Image (cartoon, rainbow, N blue to C red):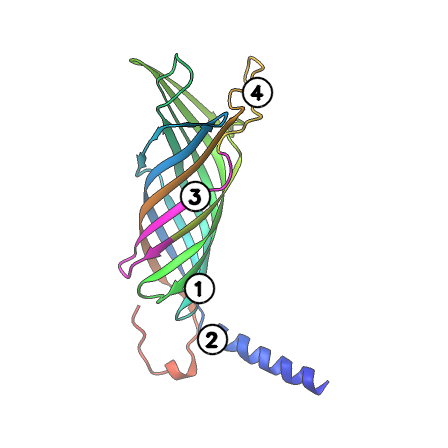
Amino acid sequence: MKKMLILFVLVAGYVGSVSAQTDIYLSGEWEFLFQGASIEDHGNKMNNNMRFTAFYHSASYINFDLWEWGGVATGLGIRNIGYIQDDVPDPDIDKIKRRSYTLGVPLIFKFGKMDGVFLFAGGEYEWAFHYKEKTFHGDVKSVYKDWFTNRTKHFLPSVVAGVQLPTGTALKMKYYLSNYLNEDYIDGNGQRPYQGMDVRMFYVSLSFVFRNDVLFRKITPHQQGVVVRR
């Protein structure tokens, strides 16, 4: 009983120490995406062009800087993700552009100087809620749009890593772990147009992070009387 009491006191003291140094605040992010994809059609690799987009990629985070050299963040983000395929087996199509707007929930772990340069890594789960497809043949362009389509996977998991500078500028890399297209999708003719296709998207982004005022901060005893610059 005595040993358990001592252990409880030690654990409570550690938790209190970490809590006392916690810095909780909001931040916003705007991204410029340079996107690509690994595309296979029945095992054959297809070529694709880089897709650059600046609209619309916005995210809001709640940050928990647990100590000076580490923290976690989560929030909500909206992105416009997709790819351009210029190697299409169908002779009636020269190029295809596919994209989805997604709503994502990230979980990010941060390592480094929280008010300086730090690395981050984690994952995100995104819900694809609006789909757009453009096909090109010569001078003819066809456009198809759909809300909550079954042509793509509804949920897209990904991993992400990057570095953020003191100015709030960040370089990020993201890779999607699942096939973007839904191979089980059946079109109006009873066919499965995406069967045998595997599209794994990725991107490199340049983002700008804007930190809001601190929501909650507890000052440790040795910080009392010290002005903390943010």
Taking depth in this image into account, of 207 and 75 the one nearest to the observer is: 207
Element on which disc 3 rests: strand
Amino acid of disc 3 = Tyr
| Residue furthest to the left | 167
Q: CA distance from mark 4 to mark 2?
A: 56 Å
Q: Residue at x 34, y 44 (%)?
A: 204
Q: Position of residue 211 (x, y in %)?
A: 34, 58
Instruction: Give whichever of discs 2 and 1 has the lower sequence position.
Output: 2
Q: Is residue 160 above or below residue 112?
A: above
- Locate the C terminus by quadrant: bottom left
Choose the circle earlier in sequence order: 3 or 1: 1
Q: Residues within 10 Å of mark 1 (few under 14, many from 20)?
A: many
Residue bearing the label numbered 2:
20
The residue carrying pointer 3 sits among few (fewer than 14), some (14 to 19) or many (20 or more) residues within 10 Å by Cα, namely: some
User: Mark 2 Cα within 10 Å, few/some/many (few <14, many 20+)?
Assistant: some
Residue 35 image label: none
Pick the residue in front: 46 or 169. 46
The residue indicated by pointer 3 is 175
Q: Which residue in the structure is indicated by mark 1?
A: 71
Question: What range is drawn magenta here?
Answer: 162-179
Judge by depth and name the residue closer to the eye, 177 or 140: 177
Does residue 64 appear in this view?
Answer: no
Residue farthest front in this picture: 44
Q: Secondary structure at mark 2?
A: helix
Disc nearest the viewer among 3 and 1: 3
Of the 4 image quadrants, the one containing the N terminus is bottom right
Image quadrant of residue 188? top right
| Real-space Cα separation, disc 2 to disc 1, in angstroms | 14 Å
Q: Is residue 5 visible?
A: yes
What secondary structure is found at the residue carrying circle 4? loop
